[in-house]
Image (tube, rainbow, N blue to C red):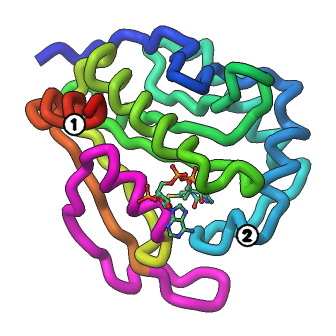
């Protein structure tokens, strides 16, 4: 099995979105929305500081030049206004076995407008059609109804629940794991078009 993975062709364009690489100048916009407690309600990570987001975006921009590229931290932007509505993440966990993981987040002022679903569906499409992955997984806190619903809507199967697997921010967190396999993808694709 080939261990090399091609690079994603960016930007990824959907009906309303351009999903593109970050530039260093995006950091203040990203901090603008992750600096909202609501964003972290169902995530165990501590909310980041502006300095941490600056450093993260610089690291992400630097990673864009890695070859082979195994991590995509992408800005999800509106096609019409160019505003950043959130982020999409695709990581190649194991190139030889074509295993990948996705992640996503949407700025609170854009919640419940379908952007999370639209971006995640586009990342799945790219992961299977461009990168020829065999399996894509995603995980979230068992309390994160929006995140679970997105993964369900794009056709991922709920594969398991890790109970009280982390202790953070003063409480136990359970994690739900979702996954989708390449042979399931054609079915998902036609369902999304319906
Ligand atoms: C989870 C998150 C990505 C959802 O993004 P979004 O753009 O609002 O999602 P969508 O508009 O595509 O909605 C998808 C579905 O989830 C539902 N949903 C969204 N937020 C929800 C919530 N807080 N509670 C229950 N359902 C929710 C929507 O109603 C929709 O379901 P429907 O089509 O059956 O009505 C967003 O709330 C977010 O970024 N949260 C903070 C970061 C985060 O938790 N990221 C995921 C980490 S794993």
Image quadrant occupied by the C terminus = top left
Q: Kindly tell me whether mark 1's CB lies below 8 Å from ligand 1.
A: no
Front residue of 93/72: it is: 72
Assess mark 2: CB under 8 A from ligand 1? yes
Q: Nearer the viewer, residue 15 or 67?
A: 15
What residue is shown at x 54% (from left), y 45% (from top)? 114
Disc 2 is placed on an element classified as helix
Residue 105 at least partly seen: yes
Of the residues under marks 1 and 2, which one precedes in the sequence? 2
Dot 1 lies on which element?
A: helix
Q: Which residue is mark 1?
A: 191
Q: Residues within 10 Å of mark 2 (few under 14, many from 20)?
A: few
The residue positioned 30% from the left and 62% from the top of the image is 177
Picture mark count: 2
Q: Which residue does the image show at 43% across and 28% down from the upper left?
A: 122
Where does the image place residue 45, in percent across and percent down from the top left?
A: 64, 67
Residue at figure coordinates x 80%, y 52% from the top left: 33
The part of the chain drawn in magenta is 145-173
Question: Quick check: 74 above or below 40?
Answer: above
Judged by depth in the image, the label closer to the viewer, 1 or 2, is 1
Establish if 29 lies above or below 174. Answer: above
Q: Horizontal and vertical percent for residue 150?
A: 42, 53
Horizontal relation, residue 21 to residue 3: left or right: right
**Residue 22 to residue 28: above or below:** above
Query: Which residue is more in the foreground, 161 or 33?
Result: 33
Image coordinates for residue 47, horizontal then vertical, percent: 76, 65
- Residue 182 higher or lower than 145, as above or below: above
Q: Are marks 1 and 2 in contact (CB under 8 Å)?
A: no
Residue that label 2 marks: 38
Left or right relative to 71: residue 138: left
Q: Residues within 10 Å of mark 1 (few under 14, many from 20)?
A: few
Indicate yes or no whether the magenta region holds residue 167.
yes
């Amino acid at each position: 099995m080939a261990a090399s993975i091609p690079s994603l062709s960016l930007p990824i364009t959907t009906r309303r979105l351009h999903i593109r690489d970050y530039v260093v100048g995006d950091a203040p916009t990203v901090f603008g929305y992750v600096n909202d407690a609501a964003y972290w309600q169902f995530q165990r990570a501590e909310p980041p500081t502006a300095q941490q987001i600056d450093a993260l975006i610089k690291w992400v921009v630097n990673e864009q030049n890695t070859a082979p590229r195994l991590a995509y931290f992408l800005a999800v932007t509106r096609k019409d206004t160019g505003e950043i509505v959130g982020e999409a993440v695709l990581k190649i966990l194991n190139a030889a076995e074509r295993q990948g993981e996705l992640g996503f987040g949407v700025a609170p002022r854009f919640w419940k407008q379908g952007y999370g679903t639209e971006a995640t569906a586009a990342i799945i499409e790219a992961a299977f059609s461009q990168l020829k992955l065999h399996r894509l997984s995603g995980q979230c806190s068992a309390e994160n109804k929006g995140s679970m619903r997105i993964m369900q809507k794009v056709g991922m199967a709920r594969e398991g629940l890790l109970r009280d697997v982390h202790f953070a921010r003063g409480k136990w967190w359970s994690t739900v794991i979702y996954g989708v396999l390449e042979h399931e993808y054609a079915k998902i694709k036609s369902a999304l078009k319906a």
